[in-house]
Image: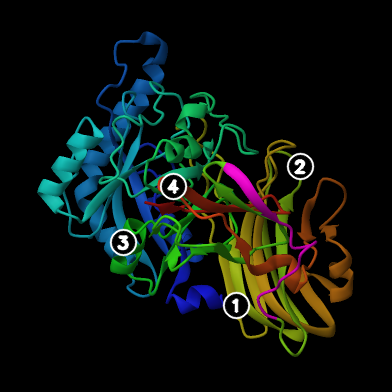
Amino acid sequence: MPRAARHGLRPLYGDIHNHCNISYGHGSLAGALENARRQLDFVSITGHAYWPDMPVDDPRVARIVDFHVKGFARLAELWPGHFETLARYHRPGEFTVFPGYEMHSAAHGDYTIVLRDLDQREMIKADSPRGLLAALRAAYGERAFAFPHHIGYRLGARGLNWQSFSEELSPVLELISMHGCAETSLTDRPFLHSMGPCDGANTVHAGLNAGRLFGVIGNTDHHSGFPGSYGHGRGAVYAADNNAEAVWSAIHARCTNALTGDNAHLFLTVGGAVQGGIVAPGSARTVAIEAVGGSFIDCIDVIRNGRLVHRVTPAISPSPIDTPERGFETILALELGWGSRGSFHDWQGWLAVRGGEILGVEPRLRGPEIVSPLEGGEHAEHTTVVAHEGDRVRFAVRSYANPNNATSATQGLALRLRLEQGARIEAEFDGQPLEVASDRLLAGALSGNLGPIDSPAYRLHPLPRPHEWQWQGELPLEPLASGDWLTLRMRQSNGQWAWTSPIFCR
């Protein structure tokens, strides 16, 4: 990541909007923090706190009102004591934890409130973003902010109200979560929750075209104690170090990305500004891109004022960031799961490489697919392990069978490898050995079952060559005018996405 490094920045990955059983939700707080630090750099566990205009007099939604009232009461009871648990997991330089809670609102949309410090004990409440800003500033100064989430619902159905949106309160907003993607009116991750579909007026592009100034971030909004649950959304911040002050400053500088799953790197510069920054009119003639995917990069789009102005396809126009003198670097992704509906399987195994080196490992783990407390109960605890030990990666994970033919529940991990000619991948799945040549995986994916049809299965994804998962370069840019905005989005062939915060011209 040479371009990011020249700016003194590196991506850190986190989830600052997700839930467990400290309010309405499933899974313990300690379990949620364990799941978070296994695959994230920073986290905030969100409690459902209050809903000023809750429809308490409408019998048609009495069941919804009931679990909200009980969840709010539970959080009020547990809130003072939960800081001790947060503090036990906070590790400066390694894993950053912020306190957080949530406000629902039909009039203004839902907001997540994040506190900077672990000694901020009071939940500050107000009925509107402006009121919330005044109350937070009075209590905590600059050490609290709030951001709107699942913004795409229509106004009145807990979607964002642009008229009451405050850039001072909300340096970023949530582009993607398990509710859906609110980039534009049409995406391949539509809003499918019972709350309704996405409204075009409440999309990221609509807000930017109206002159609003904000960055974007992704979170899961997961309700089963699994922050960063793979594929549901997560955020990236670009900072020098993993500590609370650096992460906090990056969010307020809008130096952020929204992601669906893979820990991808998508870095944008125009002139001397990086994502979230502001440039003067007519000051830049090129846009510079640095991209490191978590799989094959399908395309990188340059979006200006909501219009596609460039599309890069690395397979057609390759420009890898680095090519080692010996061998090549690639990504080996493993998926575990499948099996008969309603079942689960506890996997034990390992992966190793002969004729190469394991440079790193990225867990790609999912939590149970539950959004509402009306949908299911607690899942049994399971000890998950993903450990890089010398020349191999050992794993112990529980996978649930896919609930239908359109929803993946697989567990996974990705190994960053340096391979030499003739390298081989060795593995063991529940005592069953496997050895496969890297050339076989360069040609395509390899799958297998532990037993007969409908038994748990594994899949080793195809290996991308360096030019297929990395790209760098500069593209021509018509001079920016005041009010313009520019952003990047990247789609990978495995269906995962990344979006940068915009660069603004003012």
Mark 2 or 1: the one toward you: 1
Instruction: Identify the amino acid type marked 4.
Output: Gly
What residue is pinned by disc 2?
340
Q: Count neighbours of disc 2 (C-alpha within 10 A) and say few if under 14, some if 14 to 19, many if 20 or more.
A: some
Which residue bears the numbered disc 1? 388
Residue in the image at 28% along x and 31% along y = 164
Contact between labelled residues 1 and 2, with CB atoms less than 8 Å apart: no
Amino acid on which the number 3 mark rests in the picture: Trp
- Please name which of the two marks, 4 or 3, marks the residue nearer to the observer: 3
- Measured Cα–Cα span from mark 1 to mark 3: 30 Å
Mark 2 in CB contact with mark 4 (< 8 angstroms): no
Q: Please report the residue visible at 34 percent of the width from the left and 71 percent of the height from the top.
A: 91
**How far separated are the C-alphas under marks 2 and 1?**
30 Å
132 falls in the magenta region: no
Q: Earlier in the sequence, mark 4 or mark 1?
A: 4
Which residues make up the magenta segment?
A: 307-322
Task: Name the foreground residue: 47 vs 377.
Answer: 47
Q: Is residue 312 magenta?
A: yes
Residue 254 located left or right of residue 306: left
Q: Nearer the N terminus, badge 2 or badge 1?
A: 2
Give the SS element for disc 2.
Answer: loop
Question: How would you rate the neighbour count of disc 1 (Cα within 10 Å): few for under 14, some for 14-19, many for 20 or more?
Answer: some
The answer to whether residue 394 of the structure is visible from this angle is yes
Indicate the position of residue 408 as horizontal and vertical percent values.
68, 45
Give amino acid for label 1: His
**Residue 454 vertical placement versus 207 (above, below):** below
- Tags 4 and 1 in contact by the CB under 8 Å rule? no
Q: Is residue 311 left or right of residue 224?
A: right
Q: Which residue is mark 4?
A: 27
Q: CA distance from mark 2 to mark 3?
A: 44 Å
Q: Which mark, by number, is residue 248?
A: 3
